[in-house]
Image: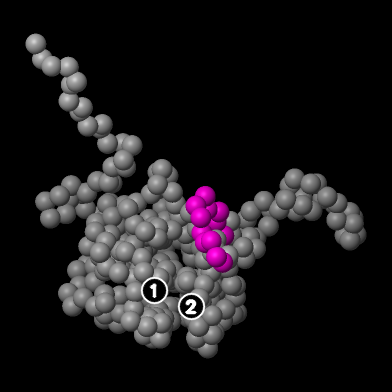
Amino acid sequence: MGEKMTHVFEREGHRIYWGDTLQILADNISDASVDLIFADPPYNIGKNFNGRKDKWISDEEYREWCYRWIDLCVRKLTPTGSIYLMAATQNMPYFDIYLSKKLHILSRIVWFYDSSGVQAKKYYGSLYEPILFGIKDRKEYTFNADEVLVEAKTGAERKLIDYRKAVPSVYNTKKVPGNVWEIPRVRYRMPEYENHPTQKPIALLERIILASSNPGDVVLDPFSGTFTTSFVANKWDRRSIGIEIEEAYVKIGLRRLEIVTHYKGEELRREAKSYERPAPIQPSLLKQP
């Protein structure tokens, strides 16, 4: 799954690379230069990415490919950097063990979402995706707890009293999120939707970027897809580096980051959804006089 040629597009602290992530990580990204990495690679489950099949010859070959970019990502992190790594449930145990030998794993996160469709009929369908949160240095890393507080229902809704305190008082109304995150998947009718089979929600990336980076930090996504990572980084005054192998998705990134308005003579516009397109003109059933 390699491409020889690399193209780069850049504007005001945001860089997009079109090419193979292994090559770009090795040749174009300096070691110890990235504060936060969000890695959401192909899962090796047969998804179709604009004609490129997400399926390796064997599970072993897929994992070996992943170990290569994981090693490169670890090298690119600053000494105080963090990484969030996603994977299919069947592959995450391997990556957990592998990454644990190189970094400190602080959290094993479950991104939970509901589904209106049938997940499975002869076994229990999957309604979550796992995320590893790892750091290089246990004593010094970024975690902005106040930026990602969520409602603590015990205090906020039930108004329960904590009698263990010297002066009994209501439980806190806010807390740091636990490691089960209930965030809806991106649906077709959502404004943020882009034409991509595994788009991650803005809300997911906002929690990660706000918690584990500061304004001005560099955020890297080696499998950018719809460039939501870069989009959120830009929104919250971070710098970003996005890598993507498919030209169609690079065009999404160029548009969302407003790096260019036209590409190869084509105006970059969000693809109209089916209900936004004008209805076809129906031929009249009546004969003209």
CA gap, disc 2 to disc 1?
A: 9 Å
Residue 270 placement (x, y as % from top left) = 28, 46
Identify whether 242 is placed above or below 263.
Answer: below
Q: Which residue is mark 1?
A: 44
Which residue is at 53% across, 61% downward? 121
Query: Residue farthest to the left?
Result: 289
Crowding at dot 2, Cα within 10 Å, few <14 / some 14-19 / many 20+, comes out as some
Q: Quadrant of residue 46?
A: bottom left
Q: Are marks 2 and 1 in contact (CB under 8 Å)?
A: yes
Q: Is residue 117 above or below residue 218?
A: above
Which label number is shown at residue 207? none
Query: Viewer-proximal residue, 22 or 57?
Result: 57
Residue 287 sits inside the magenta stretch: no
Placement of 213 over or under 150, stated as above or below: below
The residue depicted at 55 percent of the width and 56 percent of the height is 113
Residue carrying label 2: 91
**Residue name at image x 77 percent, y 52 percent:** 154
To which quarter of the image does residue 2 belong? bottom left
Q: Secondary structure at mark 2?
A: loop
Q: Is residue 69 visible?
A: yes
| Percent of width and height locating residue 212 | 52, 66
Question: Could you tell which of marks 2 and 1 lies nearer the N-terminus?
Answer: 1
The magenta span reads 112-123
Quadrant (top left/top right/bottom left/bottom right) for the C terminus: top left
Q: Mark 1 falls on what kind of element? A: loop
Decide if residue 103 is in sight here: no
Pointer 1 local density, CA inside 10 Å: few below 14, some 14–19, many at least 20: some
Residue type indicated by callout 1: Asn
Q: What amino acid type is highlighted by mark number 2?
A: Asn
Quadrant holding the N terminus = bottom left
